[in-house]
Image: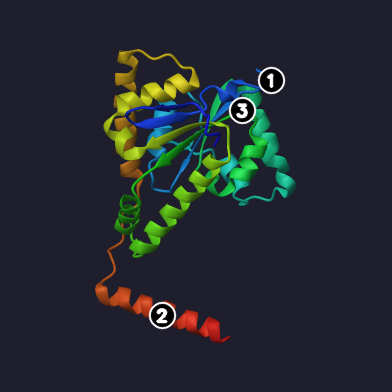
Amino acid sequence: MNPEAEMEVGESCVVLNRGASLQGADAGIGRAVLLTGNPRGGTTFVASVAHHLGIPLGKDTPRYEDRTLRFLLRGEEPDEGHVRLTETIRAREAAHPLWGWKLPAIVEHFDVVDRLVRRPIYVMVFKDPLSIAMRKVNRGDPELVGGMMASILYAQRMVQFLAGTERECVLVSFDKAIRKQGDFIRTLASVAGIPVTDARVAEIEAAVRADSLLYDRKKPAAPPLATGAELAAAKAERKRRRREAAQG
């Protein structure tokens, strides 16, 4: 990040390099609002806000993930040289003056995404690592410490990207945005160039709450948590496998 970069600090987020997505590119190329962050880290909440602002994200509600882009970026479908991914992104850029792509895995592929998307606005969501790990544990993952380490690694990757980019970015504190939803809605709308009234902000807040209820209903029931004895046995088994791998 250029130390001279423009920085706006609000109640729920920070905007860096405002307007960079408007410069140096054909105005006929649609700008892309790229929503990313930790899995279970608040990206769906942010995507819900973007959706209700009118930014097209995809059809998989209430998660708002574009399955085609997800499969191609993560290599779940064959795409040598990212030819199909490039074609799909170009189609989105041509179809919409402003479009969105929500995917936590963008963090793992910043190099590819930043090369292919020509007018990006990165919206990066940061959330307390313990909160993320606790949410995973409540859904049956026994690795509390591992979950915290994974979330910290994601945050490090985002910060490393920020250190070397001059792209337009919005850094979202999930814990603040969830409490200051009006401020976050207005900030994202302003960056995207979408005018909103106070009445419209209130409508979006209500719609986001409804999305959250729908998302919670669609979650699979959490399996029962492992007992202390089961966790100890699993830990011992992992140690045994590491010893065998080291000896082999």
Q: Which mark is on residue 237?
A: 2
Residue 97 in the image: state x and y as whole percent. Answer: 59, 20
Kindly report which numbered mark, 2 or 1, lies closer to the viewer in this rendering. 1
**Quick one: label 2, few (<14), some, or many (20+) residues within 10 Å?**
few
Which of marks 1 and 2 precedes in the sequence?
1
Residue at figure coordinates x 46%, y 54% from the top left = 153
Residue at 26%, 33% (x, y): give it: 179
Picture disc at residue 119: 3
Residue type at the position of mark 2: Glu
Q: Residues within 10 Å of mark 3 (few under 14, many from 20)?
A: many
- Res. 58 in view: no
State the SS at label 1. Answer: loop
Above-or-below relation of 156 to 114: below
Cβ atoms at labels 2 and 1 below 8 Å apart: no
Give the mark, 2 or 3, whose residue is nearer the N terminus.
3
At 65% across and 30% down in the image, what residue appears?
118
Q: Position of residue 192 (x, y in %)?
A: 49, 22
Q: CA distance from mark 1 to mark 3?
A: 9 Å
- Secondary structure beneath dot 2 equals helix
Q: Which residue is mark 1?
A: 26
Toward the viewer: 127 or 217?
127
Q: CA distance from mark 2 to mark 3?
A: 48 Å
Residue 229 screen position, x and y as percent: 27, 77
Q: What is the quadrant of the C terminus in the image? A: bottom right
N-terminal of the two: label 1 or label 3?
1
Element marked by disc 3: loop
